[in-house]
Image (tube, rainbow, N blue to C red):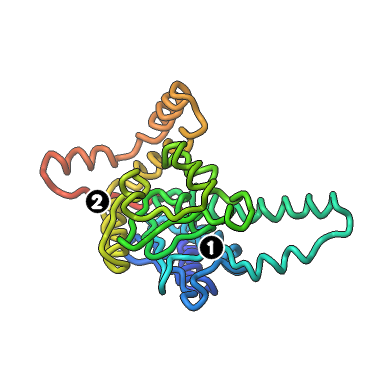
Amino acid sequence: MAGAAEAAAGAGAGRAYDSFTFEVADGIAHIQLSRPEALNTMHEPFWRELPEAFAAIEADPRVRAVVISSTGRHFTAGLDLNWAGSMFGQRHPDAGRAREQFRRHVIAMQEPFNAVDRCRVPVIAAIHGGCIGGGVDFVTACDLRVGSADCFFTIQEVNIAIVADVGTLQRIPYLLPQGLVRELAYTGRRFAAEEAARHGFLNRVLPDREAAIAAAFDLAREISAKSPLAIAGIKQVLNAGRDLSIAQGLEYVATWNAAMLQGDDMARAVMAQMHKARAEFDDLAS
């Protein structure tokens, strides 16, 4: 069974994608947007391929962290408007059915970033240049964000008379103060690296794209050295806590630890601490 899961995951990392490259090495999956000539805009294949890549990550117990990066001038200019415009022309003649169809389409477009959010391992975005519109939806679904000094974020949807609908407005209030969230959403202004770091939206600011990607991999390697069972639990508890009261969250984590603290990871970690050594942890089961 493990061999089959690893083969499926390897096939996911080895296949050719239209929107990004995908590789796994030393326990770290790397997805890099690869349409710089189109400013890495999110065209139809992107929305289909990103969940496929994250399904491959989920199937590979060797993966302990994910790095998302990009190429060219900007991280991403967001939704491919030419592709999006073509969808608006395909309407059912009945208005109610057309609106119901469109609602299902929006829900389907939310799923790629939901896959990022619920991924069992931490996802780290390395951002350079502009991260616009759908790019903000993407990086707010990640666990950590590092950026180059020239990076900036724009909740672009308001500038084209749309309510952002694939994750930004739901996730960014957990990352920024309400007043600032509303200002950014209402005005569509640029949110630059220095300001983003000051408010904790960026974990690190580095001089350039290459340094940002290197910093993301440094974080990924540090996380990968920890118990993957503990990391998976931390992410699960943090994500669940967004929908729970403090009392419910405490009950949840008590139940999680009562179920999961049955292996030898804690013993290995404690012994390593006592001997000032690095603990080695088994991969999760496939």
Report x, y in % for residue 123.
Answer: 40, 53
Residue at the spot 43% in from the left edge and 68% down from the top edge: 74
Q: Amino acid at mark 2?
A: Glu
Residue at the spot 88% in from the left edge and 59% down from the top edge: 93
User: What secondary structure is marked by label 2?
Assistant: loop
As drawn, which residue projects farthest toward the right?
Answer: 94
| Residue closest to the eye, 117 or 64 | 117
State the image quarter where residue 253 is shown: top left
71 lies left or right of 159? left
Q: Residues within 10 Å of mark 2 (few under 14, many from 20)?
A: few
| Residue closest to the eye, 26 or 46 | 46
Judge whether 210 appears above or below 192 on screen. Answer: below
Report x, y in % for residue 138.
Answer: 49, 55
205 lies left or right of 286? left
Judge whether 144 appears above or below 23 on screen. Answer: above
As drawn, which residue projects farthest toward the bottom?
Answer: 37
As drawn, which residue projects farthest toward the left?
Answer: 275
| Residue closest to the eye, 160 or 228 | 160
Report x, y in % for residue 214.
Answer: 27, 64
Mark 1, residue position: 78
The alpha-carbon separation of the residues under discs 2 and 1 comes to 40 Å
Report x, y in % for residue 105.
Answer: 70, 56
Comparing labels 2 and 1, the label whose residue is closer to the camera: 1
Residue at the spot 48% in from the left edge and 47% down from the top edge: 184
Mark 2, residue position: 280
User: What secondary structure is marked by label 1?
Assistant: loop
State the image quarter where residue 270 is shown: top left
Q: Amino acid at mark 1?
A: Gly
Of the two numbered discs 2 and 1 on the same chain, state the one appearing first in sequence. 1
